[in-house]
Image: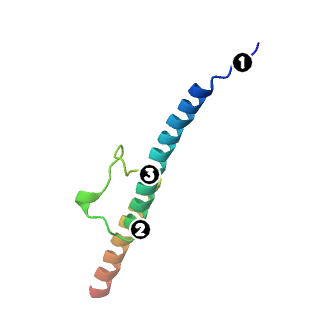
Amino acid sequence: MVRTFNKDKEIEKLGIENVVLKEQLEQLRVQLAGCGAAALGGTSPDQIAKKGDYGWSPAYQDVLDLRLRYQDAIRRREYDKTH
């Protein structure tokens, strides 16, 4: 079987793939920035991304959970120092 090559269709397909990859890259950048913000404690409760949000990822959730545990440990430590 001989495969025919349609140059225009291949170029169009590559262009569409390029657009999709650029969109995915932008979302990954947003998600990475969210991980950084969560790690530094720069997210208020009303700014926390939820599963399904554009900026949410499993890595973001892991960092957020760890940051919340860290903040809780600091509060407990400070409480123990004063009581």
Q: Is residue 32 left or right of residue 3?
A: left
Give the farthest residue toward the left: 46
Q: Which residue is mark 2?
A: 39
Q: Secondary structure at mark 3?
A: helix
Q: Secondary structure at mark 2?
A: helix
Q: Nearer the viewer, residue 52 or 75?
A: 52
Front tag of 2 and 3:
3
Q: Residue at x 58, y 27 (%)?
A: 8
Local packing at callout 3 (Cα closer than 10 Å; few below 14, some 14-19, many 20+) is few
Percent x, y of residue 31: 42, 55
| Quadrant that contains the N terminus | top right
Local packing at callout 1 (Cα closer than 10 Å; few below 14, some 14-19, many 20+) is few
Using the image, determine if residue 19 lies above or below residue 80.
Answer: above
Amino acid found under the numbered disc labelled 1: Arg
Q: Which mark is residue 26?
A: 3
Q: Nearer the viewer, residue 26 or 65?
A: 26
Using the image, determine if residue 22 lies above or below residue 35.
Answer: above
Residue 65 visible? The answer is no
Mark-to-mark CA distance, 1 and 2:
52 Å
Q: Which mark is residue 28?
A: none
Q: Residue at x 51, y 43 (%)?
A: 21
